[in-house]
Amino acid sequence: MMSKIIQSSGFNDTFEQIYQDLAYNYGCTYMSYVYEHQSSRVTHSTHPEWNSIYFGDKLLDRCGLFRVGKQFMKLNGYNETVFRWNDVNTISKDEFEINGIRTEFNIHNGLSFGKTFFGSKEFLGLATDKHHTDFPMLLVHNKAEMDWFILRMRRVAFRESLGLTYS
């Protein structure tokens, strides 16, 4: 017989709480997360206007960052990728314009994480302002903690995909 239920605060996380932790600990000023499973897609962005343009106008499908992440996983047979945005070369007018729009929102020096597992896909983009140039390296040096943040986001996305939310 169990007399006590142990509850982890991580199960009641919200995207906003996770973002606040990233902002406080790493100087993150932008977070975008996408979780896809079957026909369900959960997205979150700290910049609702950019999120609306990026996903609503389907810029995602023409974005160099998304192209590179998908290509890397497909070509190398990996199910996971991490890359610096500053290392991605634009190869089309669309990609160049999308980078320009991103810059207008003061989203710079980003790092992307991508992963496929058990039929699911998730993508996380973290960025900061143009002055915090060591931001991507700071995150890479703290990869174990980044994996914990991603797991927390996955829990929130999974709950949302099931229609479960906590207030």
Image (spheres, rainbow, N blue to C red):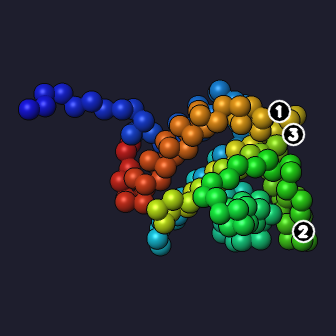
Q: Nearer the viewer, residue 148 or 5?
A: 148
Numbered disc 3: secondary structure: loop
What residue type is disc 1 on? Asp
User: Which residue is drawn at the image coordinates 42% and 36% (left, top)?
Assistant: 10
Question: Is residue 108 found left or right of 124 in the rendered image?
Answer: right
- The percent coordinates of residue 142 (x first, y second) are 66, 31
Residue that badge 1 annotates: 134
Query: SS for tag 1?
Result: loop
Question: Callout 2: few (<14), some (14-19), or many (20+) C-alpha neighbours within 10 Å?
Answer: few
Looking at the image, residue 125 lies above or below residue 142: below
Picture quadrant of residue 64: bottom right
Image height check: is 167 above or below 52? above
- Kindly state the secondary structure of the residue where label 2 is placed: loop
Q: Which mark is residue 130?
A: 3
Examine the rendered structure and indicate whether residue 150 appears above or below residue 88.
above
* Quadrant of the drawing holding the C terminus: top left
Disc 3 crowd rating (10 Å Cα; few below 14, some 14-19, many 20+) is few
Quarter residue 9 falls in: top left
Find residue 94 and report its horizontal and vertical position in percent: 86, 71
User: Looking at the picture, how far across and down is residue 88, in whole percent?
Assistant: 85, 56
Q: Which mark is residue 91?
A: 2
In the picture, measured across the screen, residue 31 lies left or right of residue 155, that is: right
